[in-house]
């Protein structure tokens, strides 16, 4: 009878503890990163009535375990750029730095956390919550040329194949993230000037037909075609406003009752102004183009020719800023001119007030110079096939000799004596650009040219940071550039439930790889090794299941009532026994 009192009492005590755990879960429902707990029970002990194993009575219930549920909680967006959640089962590596009186780090305590409410401290460290623990990761390095080089996190395969000691060494190599070295992004000089688009193969004077009637015999009618091309002698007007072309007359129709007439004076040169007016014919400024057919003289006036030729100036330029070694913007460009369909010349254009010369190292190993008085290059030449695609690059001397050599590297010399290598490309594009599959081509359509520089940037100051889904801390700068400032590996443990809670306020867990190596699966890139991707501008809240917890409360309430009734019944029986004695 006394035993039943204690049996009921054990139920009252232990199910009250279950109510306490459930109440704690519900109370922390809105806490960032909170992990709920559950209670399990076991029979306390048994009383043997006799020697038979089956003849025993249980002595009540006792609390078996209080287990922490380490499943991910609900992720909610916050729009705070320093907030980040983990979409899987990984942990942030954290540290509590211990400093001496001068602020130097002399030791650190290592922890794990899933709480990602970070902020940037005044000393540019990334700290978490009220405990102000430091976020650990692989910090990028700035090389001598100002490039920001991100650290390397081993791949999942590499991490799994590591020995325990190698995992410990990698874990201990993580640094507290400090953005002090990234407040300014140093300028870089451009390495490439890229041009893509289309060059119009129909520019220049168009071939035209003219109908002629004999002044002697009105029944004699002829049709001629005047066409143009550029010979070696015509290349002297390259990159000038007036362009010289070689013209030629072909007789295409004549009276059917006579043999093909003899036509003479059918070749010469013609110069056009930028606007398409004819400047001279065969070196003369006279107003007529004359030729003979079967001994009869014919003439065409300049106005007739100009109206028929539909002249389009065959020279196009494109410009774009590049960045110098000093981080200054310099407007740079390329001018193209069509010689004949399928054959174009080009020259680089840089401001004369700061540029003294442009050199090019070619495939023959020699260095040539554009443009100045001592220059031995007049232009480059680019050829296109019938499909409009590039076929060859060559060079042109000041004497209009075409050299079968390919440009490989351009060197710009500035008036202050500094130099800068700058490749001029018509056949490639920046992989990060939307133009990465575009090339310079030639078609019979409007000329549309685009240009962009590679490799260069102006000086920039750090505006803000953000986390990306791959675990990178990305810095955004005032010059429009961004860079990976650090990479955060996520820690994967074999038994999260075995982690010891360090601080309930921040839901952080003690973890030292030297001590807890048996529980360390590895440190992985976000999204690998079961860690889950990072979710920027979001936080993980508690994993408390409200409906389940409320159900547990009802269940524990009933269990408490049952055990209270058990105690009450035992008490009533005991009271009845006492009264029998009376």
Image: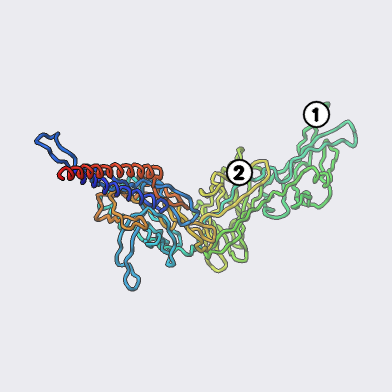
Q: Nearer the viewer, residue 443 or 237?
A: 443
Q: Residues within 10 Å of mark 1 (few under 14, many from 20)?
A: few
Q: Mark 1 points at which residue?
A: 259
Indicate left or right for 391 with 289 as reference. Answer: left
- Give the percent coordinates (x, y) of residue 178: 40, 63
Q: Nearer the viewer, residue 264 or 41?
A: 41
Question: SS of the residue at dot 1?
Answer: loop
| N-term-proximal mark, 1 vs 2 | 1
Extreme top residue here?
A: 257
- Give the percent coordinates (x, y) of residue 60: 21, 43
Question: Which quarter shows the C terminus?
Answer: top left
Whether residue 544 is visible to the viewer of this picture, yes or no, is yes
Camera-side mark, 1 or 2? 2
Whether residue 532 is visible to the viewer of this picture, yes or no, is no
The circle on residue 445 is none
- Disc 1/disc 2 C-alpha distance (Å): 44 Å
């Amino acid at each position: 009878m006394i035993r039943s009192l204690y049996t009921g009492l054990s139920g009252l005590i232990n199910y009250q503890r279950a109510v306490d755990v459930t109440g704690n879960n519900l109370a922390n429902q809105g806490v960032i990163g909170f992990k709920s707990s559950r209670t399990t029970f076991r029979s306390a002990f048994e009383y043997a009535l006799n020697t038979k194993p089956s003849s025993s009575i249980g002595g009540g219930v006792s609390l078996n375990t209080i287990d922490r549920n380490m499943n991910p909680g609900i992720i909610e967006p916050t729009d705070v750029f320093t907030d980040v959640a983990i979409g899987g089962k990984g942990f942030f590596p954290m540290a509590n730095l211990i400093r001496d009186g001068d602020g130097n780090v002399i030791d650190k305590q290592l922890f794990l956390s899933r709480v990602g409410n970070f902020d940037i401290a005044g000393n540019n460290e990334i700290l978490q919550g009220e405990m102000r623990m430091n976020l650990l990761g692989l910090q990028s390095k700035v090389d001598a040329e100002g490039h920001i080089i991100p650290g390397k996190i081993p791949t999942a395969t590499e991490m799994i194949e590591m020995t325990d000691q190698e995992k410990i060494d990698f874990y201990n190599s993580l640094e507290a993230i400090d953005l002090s070295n990234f407040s300014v992004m140093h300028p870089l000089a451009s390495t490439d000037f890229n041009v893509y688009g289309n060059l119009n193969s129909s520019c220049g004077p168009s071939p035209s037909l003219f109908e002629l009637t004999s002044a002697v015999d009105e029944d004699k009618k002829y049709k001629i075609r005047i066409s143009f091309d550029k010979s070696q002698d015509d290349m002297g007007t390259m990159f000038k406003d007036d362009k010289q072309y070689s013209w030629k007359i072909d007789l295409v129709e004549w009276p059917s009752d006579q043999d093909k007439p003899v036509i003479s004076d059918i070749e010469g040169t013609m110069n056009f102004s930028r606007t398409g007016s004819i400047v001279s014919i065969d070196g003369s400024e006279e107003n007529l183009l004359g030729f003979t057919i079967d001994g009869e003289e014919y003439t065409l006036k300049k106005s007739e020719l100009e109206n028929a030729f539909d002249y389009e100036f065959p020279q196009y330029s494109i410009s774009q800023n590049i960045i110098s070694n000093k981080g200054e913007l310099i407007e740079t460009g390329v001018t193209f001119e069509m010689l004949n369909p399928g054959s174009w010349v080009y020259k680089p254009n840089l401001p004369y007030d700061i540029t003294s010369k442009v050199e090019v190292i070619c495939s023959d190993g020699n260095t040539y110079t554009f443009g100045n008085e001592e220059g031995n290059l007049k232009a480059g030449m680019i050829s296109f096939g019938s499909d409009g695609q590039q076929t060859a690059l060559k060079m042109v001397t000041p004497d209009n000799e075409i050299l079968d050599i390919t440009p490989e590297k351009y060197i710009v010399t500035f008036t202050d004596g500094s130099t800068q290598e700058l490749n001029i490309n018509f056949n490639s594009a920046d992989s990060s650009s939307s133009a990465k599959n575009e090339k310079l081509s030639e078609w019979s359509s409007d000329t549309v040219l685009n240009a962009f520089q590679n490799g260069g940037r102006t000086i920039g100051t750090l505006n803000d940071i953000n986390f990306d889904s791959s675990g990178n801390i990305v810095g955004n700068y005032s010059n429009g550039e961004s860079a990976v400032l650090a990479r955060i590996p996520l820690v994967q443990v074999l038994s999260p439930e075995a982690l010891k809670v360090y601080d309930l306020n921040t839901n952080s867990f003690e973890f030292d790889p030297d001590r807890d190596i048996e529980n360390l699966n590895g440190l992985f890139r976000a999204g690998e090794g079961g860690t889950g991707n990072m979710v920027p501008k979001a936080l993980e809240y508690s994993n408390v299941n409200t409906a389940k917890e409320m159900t547990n409360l009802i269940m524990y309430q009933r269990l408490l009532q049952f055990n209270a009734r058990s105690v009450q019944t035992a008490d009533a029986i005991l009271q009845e026994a006492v009264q029998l004695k009376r």
